[in-house]
Amino acid sequence: MPPHDGVRERSGLVRDRETERVRRFYDSVADRHDTSIRLFEKLLFADGRRWVCAQARGDVLEIAVGTGRNFPHYPMDVRLTGIDLSPAMLGVARGRADELGRDVDLKVGDAQALDFPDARFDTVVATLALCTIPDDRRVVAETWRVLRPGGLFLLLEHVRSPLLPVRLVQRLLDPLIVRFQADHLLREPLRYLEAEGFVIDHLERSKWGIVERLTARKPAS
Ligand SMILES: C[S@@+](CC[C@H](N)C(=O)[O-])C[C@H]1O[C@@H](n2cnc3c(N)ncnc32)[C@H](O)[C@@H]1O
């Protein structure tokens, strides 16, 4: 990304404008995020967080961890690391981890360029994350890189519906939601996962095909 398209960070990296816009958006909504997401989450995702976290094992990385809404659902024996672009969202997550008495290593980071060595984690978790991150394909590639062979990528996401009338509504709303909520309605991470080499162990769609639960595995060899 050429410098004129980005914001120069202290580290010297150039972060692209859209990623910077997303960070500013989440920094600005962090203190009301939990309240505003509650109803949406209840209507669409039911026990999805529990479903995802119950499968996590070993060294776990949660990308775009937000305010840490998954923390109560992880087994106590996982070693949890969480990254997020927004320091303000991470501030809320720290408070939640403290309240729950959970030891979580929380860091500011970009899921499009993970600051971890190859094959560092047994599990990567992404819930309501790929819908927000500007380059979701890069996130899938980075997830593949940091996962150990045999590792799991666990996803809970809202995606493009296969039903035409629903998809048309999503198409109409998408530009507005992207602009004002930094959220994409027409994403379909499955195709990137398969292209990257992940094996899909479980795929479930619900709510007119909008909600996806997915377990993908990086093959052992
Ligand atoms: C809708 S919230 C979901 C938070 C959390 N995953 C959950 O399930 O509640 C989206 C989160 O993605 C984070 N995010 C957006 N782009 C990111 C990026 N490139 N790298 C890391 N986090 C990012 C935002 O800061 C925000 O906390």
Image (tube, rainbow, N blue to C red):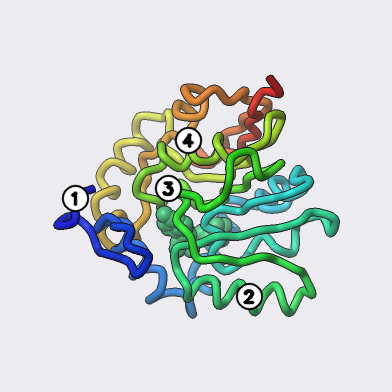
Give the x, y percent position of residue 76: 84, 59
Nearer to us: label 4 or label 2: 4
Mark 1 burial class by Cα count in 10 Å: few <14, some 14-19, many 20+:
few
Query: What residue is disc 4 on?
Result: 141
Q: Amino acid at mark 2?
A: Arg
Mark 4 and mark 1: Cα distance apart in space? 22 Å
Q: Residue at x 65, y 58 (%)?
A: 81
Mark 3 burial class by Cα count in 10 Å: few <14, some 14-19, many 20+:
some
Nearer to us: label 2 or label 1: 1
- In the current view of this chain or complex, which residue is farthest to the right? 77
Which of disc 2 and disc 4 is earlier in sequence?
Answer: 2
Mark 2 burial class by Cα count in 10 Å: few <14, some 14-19, many 20+:
some
Q: For disc 3, does the CB lie below 8 Å from ligand 1?
A: yes
Which of disc 4 and disc 3 is earlier in sequence?
Answer: 3
Q: Amino acid at mark 3?
A: Gln
Query: Can the viewer see residue 44?
Result: no
Query: What residue is disc 3 on?
Result: 112
Query: What residue is disc 2 on?
Result: 94
